[in-house]
Image: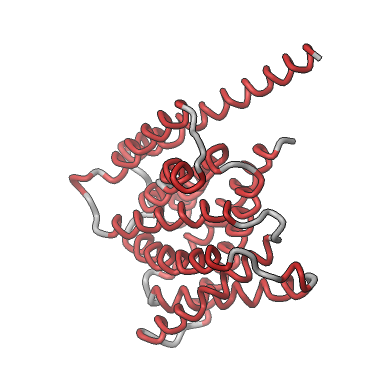
């Protein structure tokens, strides 16, 4: 199995967990202040990661690229806060359609930050995807919460792109531990502003969200270390399918025809391109083998 295929599968699994986290946030129904949610989620995540981090050798626990990790930690705070607001005030499908602009943003960001050179097919697929996102948003019916969803998309794109700056020899556990630790001080200070007691159910939902997001982050780190961002970012769109199904099942949120068209414009071109690329690689591999 190629690194690209492994990266794709890891991202699909990660997005399933991320979608379940969105369900937990939606069930909170805005009862928990976003800043307090972020603090508890990050604290729970750190507690879960620490035993795994301590089991590593001293050398494995050491942090590399501290500046990049610090930036990624703060991106978590910004993106998570905006995500809570967007999911609370929008349907799961609509909010996530905007979140999944992130892989589209990763194409230009991978060019600017990583100096990757995307093929024409990727550029065309990205363009169609942006048009699809606009159809979902429908500027004439634009909801203010969509602005927070767009910020989440930007922070997610930067978060995933920056992982390419982290040496592949650094373990996923170490990357997650330090990133989470760096996000705690500021999140704790901000949470105090609107601190309130939480019920057992609310803490349970926050804990579920923390576990799911931790799983997503770990799988995303593995995925983007396995393959170039431009080659596997399309797999992020699998989460859009998950949230549509979860939205229908849990919240009776049935997308209208324009939303479905917009989502299809986001998904189909990239899925087709990947199928063609995969087929081409197989043909080329057989040709090279025959030549040898």
The quadrant the C terminus occupies is top right
Q: Is residue 50 left or right of residue 146?
A: right
Q: Would you identify the image quadrant in which residue 143 lies? A: bottom left
Q: Residue at x 38, y 69 (%)?
A: 29
> Residue 15: in sight, yes or no?
yes
In this view, 14 is above or below 79: above
Task: Please tell me which residue lies in front, 202 or 70.
Answer: 70
Q: Identify the image quadrant of residue 286.
A: top right
Q: Which percent across, then down, holds residue 155?
A: 42, 58
Q: Name the foreground residue: 272 vs 184.
A: 184
The residue at the point 73 percent across, 75 percent down is: 51
Q: Position of residue 66 (x, y in %)?
A: 57, 68
Q: Residue at x 48, y 77 (%)?
A: 39
**Residue 32: x, y in percent?**
40, 76
Q: Quadrant of residue 128?
A: top left
Give the answer, above or below, for where 138 lies relative to 121: below
Please say if 196 is above or below 232: below
Seen in the image, is 12 located left or right of residue 35? right
Quadrant placement of the N terminus = top right
Residue at left offset 44%, top offset 45% = 112
Q: How is the image coloured?
A: secondary structure
**Number of dots carrying numbers:** 0
């Amino acid at each position: 199995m190629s690194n690209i295929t492994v990266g794709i599968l890891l991202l699909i699994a990660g997005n399933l967990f991320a979608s379940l986290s969105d369900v937990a946030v939606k069930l909170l129904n805005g009862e928990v202040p976003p800043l307090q949610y972020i603090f508890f989620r990050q604290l729970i995540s750190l507690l879960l990661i620490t035993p795994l981090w301590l089991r590593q050798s001293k050398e494995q626990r050491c942090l590399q690229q501290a500046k990049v990790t610090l930036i990624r930690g703060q991106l978590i705070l910004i993106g998570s806060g905006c995500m809570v607001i967007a999911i609370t005030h929008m349907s799961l499908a609509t909010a996530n359609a905007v979140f999944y602009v992130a892989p589209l943003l990763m194409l230009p960001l991978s060019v600017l930050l990583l100096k990757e050179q995307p093929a024409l097919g990727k550029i065309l697929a990205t363009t169609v995807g942006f048009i699809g996102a606009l159809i979902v948003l429908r500027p004439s019916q634009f909801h203010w919460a969509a602005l927070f969803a767009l910020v989440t998309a930007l922070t997610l794109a930067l978060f995933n792109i920056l992982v390419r700056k982290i040496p592949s020899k650094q373990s996923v556990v170490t990357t997650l531990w330090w990133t989470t630790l760096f996000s705690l001080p500021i999140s704790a200070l901000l949470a105090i502003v609107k601190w309130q007691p939480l019920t057992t159910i609310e803490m349970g939902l926050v804990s579920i969200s923390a576990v799911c997001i931790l799983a997503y982050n770990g799988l995303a780190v593995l995925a983007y270390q396995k393959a170039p961002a431009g080659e596997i970012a399309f797999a992020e769109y699998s989460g859009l399918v998950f949230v549509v199904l979860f939205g229908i099942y849990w919240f009776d949120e049935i997308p209208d025809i324009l939303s479905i068209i917009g989502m299809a414009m986001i998904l189909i071109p990239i899925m087709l391109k990947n199928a063609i690329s995969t087929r081409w690689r197989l043909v080329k591999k057989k040709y090279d083998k025959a030549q040898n």
